Amino acid sequence: MMEIKRKIAAGIVRFRTAILVAVLVLAAVSVTLIGKTRINYDLTRYLSEDTMTRRALSVMQEEFGSSEQLRVMFRDLEGETLDTCVRAMSALDEVSIARHDPETDVREKDDATYQLVTLTLNECDAAALVTRLRGMFPEAGEYAVGGSAASSLDLQRSVGAEIPRVMAISVAVVLIVLLLTSRAWLEPLVILIVLAVSILINMGTNFIFPDVSFITFAVSAILQLALSIDYAIMLLHVWNGLAEEGRSPIDAMTEALIQCFMRIASSAFTTAAGLLSLLFMSFTIGFDIGLVLTKGILISMLGVFLLMPAVTLVFEKGLARTRHKPFRLGGAHLARFVYRFRGVVAAALILAVLGGASLQTTRLFTFTDNGQSTRGGDSARISAVFGSSNPLVLLVPGGDTDEDYDRQRALVEKLKRIYYGGDEPAVGEITAMVTAGAAALEYYTPQDVAELTGQSALAVTLYFAAQGYGTSVRADRLLSEAGALAEGNEEIAALQNTLAAAQSAFNGPHYARMLVELTFRTTDTPSLRRVIGEIGDAVRGVYGDDFYITGGPMSTYDIAAAFQGDLMRVNFITLLAIFLIVALSFRAVILPLILVFVIEGSIWINVALSRADGIFFMCYLICVAIQMGATIDYGILLSDQYRALRRGGHAVEDALSEAMSRAMPTILTSGVILVTAGYIVGRACSIYYISSIGLLLSRGAAISVFLILTLLPALLALCDRAIVKPEKQTSIERRF
């Protein structure tokens, strides 16, 4: 095995120029492909196909086409001006219904009066309509247009505007950290060149996927940089050490590759194992993020093995000329402190871990952004005044007979008897053919029609007889066949247009659509599951099992139902895969158990600290996989150094001190970068999902680094006899 490693390392160094050219050409091609990668902003795409939401969306697309709702919020508008705006929106071809209730759609806040108009759209380009609406009413002053299409548009703008700025800040921070911990002022340039090329190749090769989520697109470059920078640091530090021993740059690089193959590969594979566990989420955005980031980690690993030797040797003279004394991090002093108080340190931190484990069992997860997908966006502004909109869409068997509409009326009555808590009705406004179009379902006599049209009662009676209406007829049938009665009658023509719009909005070829607005604004409560269940029971009581429900609350319900399975699956696969990789790398059992305990403990503490604010479920799953897969690298590095020194004859305290001195530059450099990058993403990005991932990962990485530099050394010392077998210890070592 050693001979194979030596041949591979020698070949990489010998053919470094050809490899450099090939990789740079690949990077140049990748740059041209980045712009061709499709970005998806619709998170419902990642729901499982067998969920009620996805099945309902499929049926609704077939029956009604792509349609959705928008919310328009005005401020301090006079009644006449507001009516003019509502009429103007009603007249748009894209709008089937524009609804404003003066009783429920008005709020007083901060000495201002806000008015809300809800638009139900026909099949159209909703994003284009949002852009049009935002410039449609200059006389209304400042107003906001929200809804899923508006949020998607805001997301696109935020990603395009913020991610380059966040990336620039992150790179600047990385550069500062590298300068403080480097041995030459030119080292950061070498590292950043290698990782920049790896990131460009990863982003360009995303072209092979049908699309990637906006979350993946936004965080993949930053996380790839933060997760894989320790590979480059590790190789460069080993090369520096060998060069300082007097070896030639080429020989030092060959030997550095040999020594680092297993360390870097183990680190990369443990990180990849954590990320690959996301592929097993039923909410398939995990597959999207896991696949892209795993690809990025493997590309970075190959970049360090193949590209870094060439780049380092190109800058070899510059590195030599810019050498300086590295910033002393005090690894030896910390190691001696931990060793001296190892029992106390281990006991205190194990208690903290167990406390975190206890608290995190009662963690509160959230399953929706509550209208805060982009901080400061129009949807967030509307939600701050009127709360998040929680509409449900019910699809029930259609038909236009009186019996069909009687069933709808019976369902409406059942829905109104569902309560959220106490005496608070769970269902507010219900928009359907039997409510919004109720006037079209009333019966008219010849006398009623005569008064409406201005024609003689006798003429209308004869018309009724000719059409076979009898003594009365339902308004929708009369309007659809009005014929001569509608000629020149603007009122009848307007009613016909209204009827056509209502029928298009509510009656499909096989199913009727009912829009149900829930009264409560927070959908992250156990009551949501009960209310959704009762709504399903109410529909089932009228229509049997032939119905569908979709909308934001239903999506939340589906996600929450699948989450426990995702949670157990991701945690189990991550732990098992990482344990097996570490166990195979160390060919031991006790040490991998210690490492997994330390990193899992940091996750428990991180989750426990997040209970007060709640944890967005997707951020939790992603951060657990990344935190476990990435920060265990630091533990592997420290443990590997310690075990090698112990087997080399060092006493426990000396081995711990030397191992900490060697490993701390890499651990702190990579750890500080991961912590800082996550924090910058969390604070500088207005996109809720991305910001939440950044802040949770930042805190988790900080806790992991702290435990690796305190709890892990204490456990290594206390469990030394189990980690380093007695037969491999010298008599001097056994003084421990």
Image (tube, rainbow, N blue to C red):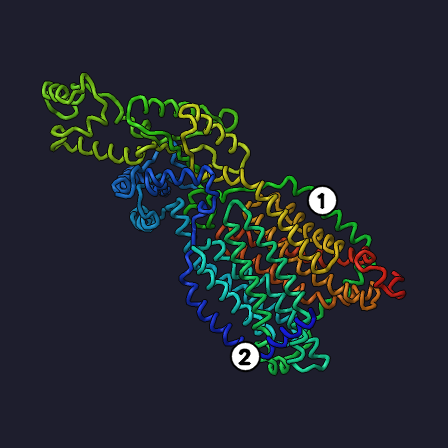
Q: Is residue 154 left or right of residue 613?
A: left
Residue 374: in sight, yes or no?
yes
- Tell me which corner region of the image, top left, top right, bottom left or bottom right, holds residue 723: bottom right
Give how far across and how far down residue 497 sits, in percent: 22, 35
- Tell me which corner region of the image, top left, top right, bottom left or bottom right, holds residue 222: bottom right
Q: Nearer the viewer, residue 25 or 116?
A: 25
Q: Residues within 10 Å of mark 1 (few under 14, many from 20)?
A: some
User: The N terminus appears in which quarter of the rendering?
Assistant: bottom right
Labelled disc at residue 355: 1
Q: Which residue is found at the position 70% from the left and 75% from the top?
A: 241
User: The C terminus appears in which quarter of the rendering?
Assistant: bottom right
Q: Which residue is found at the position 61% from the left and 58% from the top?
A: 271
The amino acid marked with disc number 1 is Gly
Q: Residues within 10 Å of mark 2 (few under 14, many from 20)?
A: some
The amino acid marked with disc number 2 is Thr
Give how far across and how far down residue 349 sits, in percent: 75, 51
Residue 141: in sight, yes or no?
no
- Tell me which corner region of the image, top left, top right, bottom left or bottom right, holds residue 581: bottom right
Q: Nearer the viewer, residue 571 or 634?
A: 571
- In the picture shown, does residue 3 fall above or below 207? below
Q: Nearer the viewer, residue 583 or 327?
A: 583
Q: Is residue 337 left or right of residue 458?
A: right
Q: Say whether disc 2 or disc 1 marks the residue closer to the N-terminus.
A: 2
Give how far across and how far down residue 19 sits, in percent: 54, 75
Instruction: Read off the residue under disc 2.
Output: 17
- In the picture shown, does residue 441 fall above or below 61? above
The residues tagged by marks 2 and 1 sit, at their Cα atoms, a distance apart of: 54 Å
Q: Is residue 579 left or right of residue 443?
A: right
Q: Which structural element holds mark 2?
A: helix
